[in-house]
Amino acid sequence: MKKLKIASIPGDGIGKEVVPAAIDVLETISDLHGGLSFDFTEFPYSCDYYLEHGEMMPEDGLKRLSDFDSIFLGAVGDANLVPDHISLWGLLIKIRREFEQTINVRPAKQLPGIQSPLVNPNDFDLLVVRENSEGEYSSIGGRIYRDEDEIAIQNNVFSRKATERVMRFAFDLATKRQKRVTSATKSNGIVYSMPFWDEVFKDVSNDYPDVETDQQHIDALTAFFVTNPSRFDVLVASNLFGDILSDVGAGIMGSIGVAPAGNINVNGKYPSMFEPVHGSAPDIIGKGIANPIGQIWTAKMLLDHHGEEEIGQVLLDVIEETTSDRIVTADLGGKHTTKEVTDEIIKRLKAKA
Ligand code: ATP
Ligand code: MG
């Protein structure tokens, strides 16, 4: 019997509504599959916690979380309660950094029954793998003053270690999918870091002879996301390029309410953290209409991460059947509530068991 110890952090706003929904789904899966169970511990770290205690989590918060197999998070931040820089840096970014979650993974897939904003969505199913610890978002730089001018300099930092790590991760994922990796580059304009990126991509690809590779400049690549996303399987990108691509990916899915994500600790020293792309959605708190699919699909990523890909696939199939039959919330043009969508997914999981 495999038992996964999961720290759940519902966080703020609709996080408190969709995390319990997704946990119900995971509990159902554990009831249906004898070999897998979950041990959930909930942590109240959030803006409410801050208002009461003056910090987003206690001093030993990270230490407490470090014992878990994974962290399952809803949303952090509600600018009506606590300024974003405090809530994000005090919890989300702290966990990502201290737990060395150096890779961010975001799938984007055309769900049946959901209107993509694209004219010709063509059943896309892709995965953006983003380096999440260095690159363009480095803290090295500053300002200089020269010839009565003021100049800001921001250094890009690409280490071979982190670059190789994200690429191997992307290739490993591709071997379980369509066996295609596309690298986002810009070596025709960024003349030091991107040729290095390309070189490492080539080196790593040599270890994966069965995986087809492709490189595209980020400008053209972003256009292809809109004109022909179905040509992609796994994409690997630097911090900035991955940030952009993953948001375009969420955009073409039709609602931010369905988009899942994972922050991965590759060395296994610390837990990885799974959280949907959407935020706390202050405008719909308490109405019971938050779309739970982003959080439930995020639960599928958690299952995959722990080697339960078969069950993960069943869960995604059920999500797709549910959207196909238009049991969906208002953000997808439906009339169903968070609870109705969740109950439908649970009902269909049981019917498949
Ligand atoms: P944050 O800074 O936390 O990312 P935000 O306001 O930028 O917050 P979201 O909280 O994701 O972004 O909300 C953006 C819009 O999408 C809001 O109108 C919100 O109601 C809607 N939205 C986000 N998530 C969902 C969801 N799960 N179901 C329905 N609507 C959602
Ligand atoms: Mg936002």
Image (spheres, grey):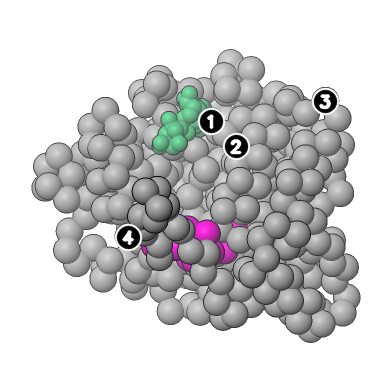
Tell us which disc is closer to us: 4 or 1: 4
In space, the residues marked 1 and 2 are separated at their CA atoms by 7 Å
Q: Is residue 101 visible?
A: yes
Q: Is mark 1 within 8 Å of ligand 1?
A: yes
Is 240 part of what is drawn in magenta?
Answer: no
Q: Amino acid at mark 3?
A: Val
The residue where tag 1 is placed is 291
**Residue 202's x, y, as percent?**
78, 76
Q: Is mark 3 within 8 Å of ligand 1?
A: no
4 or 3: tag closer to the N-terminus: 4
Is 138 part of what is drawn in magenta?
Answer: yes
At a point 29% along the width and 44% down the height, the residue shown is 85
The residue where tag 3 is placed is 119
155 horizontally vs 245: left or right: left
* Camera-side residue of 196 and 284: 196
Please say if 32 is above or below 255. Answer: below
Q: Amino acid at mark 4?
A: Lys
Q: Is residue 169 visible?
A: no
Tell us which disc is closer to us: 3 or 2: 3
At a point 57% along the width and 53% down the height, the residue shown is 240
Query: Would you say the residues marked 1 and 2 are in contact, meaning their CB atoms lie under 8 Å apart?
Result: yes
The residue where tag 4 is placed is 94
**Residue 36's x, y, as percent?**
55, 66
The residue where tag 2 is placed is 258
Please say if 258 is above or below 188. Answer: above
